[in-house]
Image (tube, rainbow, N blue to C red):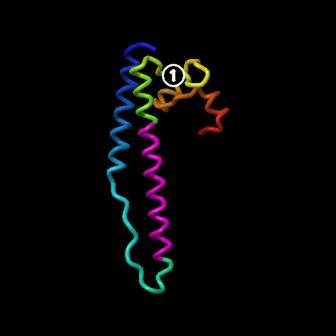
Amino acid sequence: MDATRLDEARAALVAERARMLTELGDAIDAPEQMTYGSQAAAASQVFAQQRDLALREAAERRVREVDAALARLDAGTFGLCGSCGAPIAAARLDALPWAALCIDCQRRTGGR
């Protein structure tokens, strides 16, 4: 991979990391005091809180993936599959610069 592509990948990763950290800065609202008979309101608040927690976990996971990709850039292994060692397709890295696996190995892991 040439230096220009590596610089572009680094810029994309740094931007994604900043975006995720901004999302993580948003507070999750705690449920409000419920009054008797407000089961629908309580259910809505619990749902919203669970949704916010799931989004926070996804953002935290993305930050870890981006940090790992930046470490691979520094180590000189960016763009190589962490499983089989083959190059990761440029189109995949354009779409997901934090991708650690080639598409074949990603499919074998069940898409996780």
Image coordinates of residue 105 in percent, x first then y, are: 63, 28
Is residue 54 found left or right of 111 in the rendered image?
left
Q: Which residue is drawn at 43% across and 46% down?
A: 59
Q: Residues within 10 Å of mark 1 (few under 14, many from 20)?
A: few
**Towards the viewer: 91 or 62:** 62
Where is residue 93? Give x, y as percent.
Answer: 49, 27
Q: Name the residue under label 1.
A: 90
The chief SS type of the magenta part is helix
Query: Which residue corresponds to the image point at 61% horizontal and 32% vertical from the top-left?
Result: 106
Indicate the quadrant containing the C terminus: top left, top right, bottom left or bottom right.
Answer: top right
User: Residue at image x 64%, y 35%?
Assistant: 109
Q: Quadrant location of residue 84?
A: top right
Along the horizontal axis of the image, is 84 left or right of 77?
A: right
Residue 6, quarter of the rendered image:
top left
**Residue type highlighted by circle 1:** Ala
> Which residue occupies 36% across, 49% down?
24
Q: Is residue 44 magenta?
A: yes
Position of residue 109 in the picture relative to residue 50 (left or right): right
Mark 1: which secondary structure? helix
| Residue 57 highlighted magenta (yes or no) | yes
Q: Give the range drawn in magenta.
A: 41-64
